[in-house]
Image (cartoon, rainbow, N blue to C red):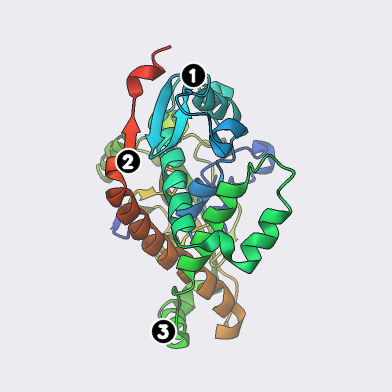
Amino acid sequence: MKKEVKKKPVNKEPVKKEPAKKAPANKKKWMPWAIAVGAIVVVVIVLLIWDPPFVKNIVGEPEGSDGGGKIIARVASSKLTLDDYQTMVALYVPPENQGQFDPMEIINAWIEQEIVYQEAKKMGLERSDTVRMALDQLKFAYELNRKQLLTQAWLSEEAKNIAVSSDELRTYFNAHKEEFLYEVKISQIVLADPVAAAQIYQQLKQGADFGKLAEQYTLDPLRGKPSTFLPRGSGMFTLAMEDAIFTLAPGEFTEPFITAQGLTMIFKLADKRKVRKDIAFEEVGAYLEAMILNERGETVISLKLDSLKSAAQSDIEIHMENLLY
């Protein structure tokens, strides 16, 4: 029976930083599903990717207009019409997945951006010098990016109070210094369904073959084949993932990790080798700071966003019945 490594729930050749995925399998390029090193928050990616080209929903419609389609969702006076929704699906969902994705992923992303945009307006962020200069340069572009710009301004404002001290960084480094001397090869199982991932994890604990399960279920093109050797600090993993992976012995596997993009990943250590005799804090200090800020920011922004969504519940409407077209 394989050893469990209990860490919090991607990689270079594993599927960045997210989930996404298209590297030539013959070159064994990992598809970086999860993280972009130095980004403030992974969850922010979800909020910022939606840049839909339906100008009417950004600029506004005459009173009583339905925007040319049934209304799928509403946040106060802003609305997501069926036409808008279909446009977003066409733009952001790969054709091969359009019959099996969850519509609420798009609806929730739209709602979250609307809520953050409205909060940014309340905070007066569009009057700041930096934002005003950027908005002036967008006058010719339908006003399309105004909401995204203010969303980014809000994220930057919230991130100002997220910090990590030098003592924290050195404490973390000292606790994990030995791991930075090694490189590892890993195999992975990538799943879209966390329930299925939990079931596969139980099978692994009972002795099931990792490679066979990966070949049958994983979403990445390597189909369970090992990566090339990856150092600690490669930027392909979150710190929690690295904490788990670099304490494994060959043949051991991690608990499932849920990525910001909604994928679930299980890693198995295929091989491990020592490549350095020593390492100085200065060599990895900036990397650790970016990674810790990233993970801390994810928590802070998520909590803040949850609070805004709770406060806006009375302004939110969702009409799933209008998707039956």
Of residues 16 and 198, the one drawn nearer to the viewer in this rendering: 16
Q: Does dot 2 land on a helix, a strand or a loop?
A: helix
Residue drawn where x is 58% and y is 63% of the image: 127
What element does badge 3 sit on?
helix
Q: Position of residue 207 (x, y in %)?
A: 29, 42
Using residue 188 as the reference point, say whether residue 55 is left or right of it.
right
Q: Which residue is mark 2?
A: 315
Q: Which mark is residue 171?
A: 3
Could you say which is closer to the camera, residue 15 or residue 289?
A: 289
**Between marks 3 and 2, how big is the CA–CA gap?**
45 Å
Could you classify mark 1 by the number of other residues whose Cα lies within 10 Å: few (under 14), some (14-19), or many (20 or more)? some
- Identify the mark nearer the N-term, 1 or 2: 1
Residue 262 image position (x, y, % from top left): 41, 42
Tell me which amino acid carries mark 1: Gly
Label located before the other in sequence (3 or 2): 3
Residue 196 shows which numbered tag? none
Residue 102 seen in this snapshot: no
Residue mark closest to the camera, 1 vs 3 = 1
Q: Which residue is mark 1?
A: 69
Q: What amino acid type is highlighted by mark number 3?
A: Thr
Characterize the local packing of mark 2: few (<14), some (14-19) or many (20 or more) Cα atoms within 10 angstroms: few
Residue type at the position of mark 2: Asp
| Structural distance between the alpha carbons of marks 1 and 3 | 56 Å
Residue 71: image location, x then y, percent: 42, 24
Residue farthest bottom in this picture:
167
Whether 153 is drawn above or below 85: the answer is below
- Whole-number angstrom distance, CA of label 1 to CA of label 2: 20 Å
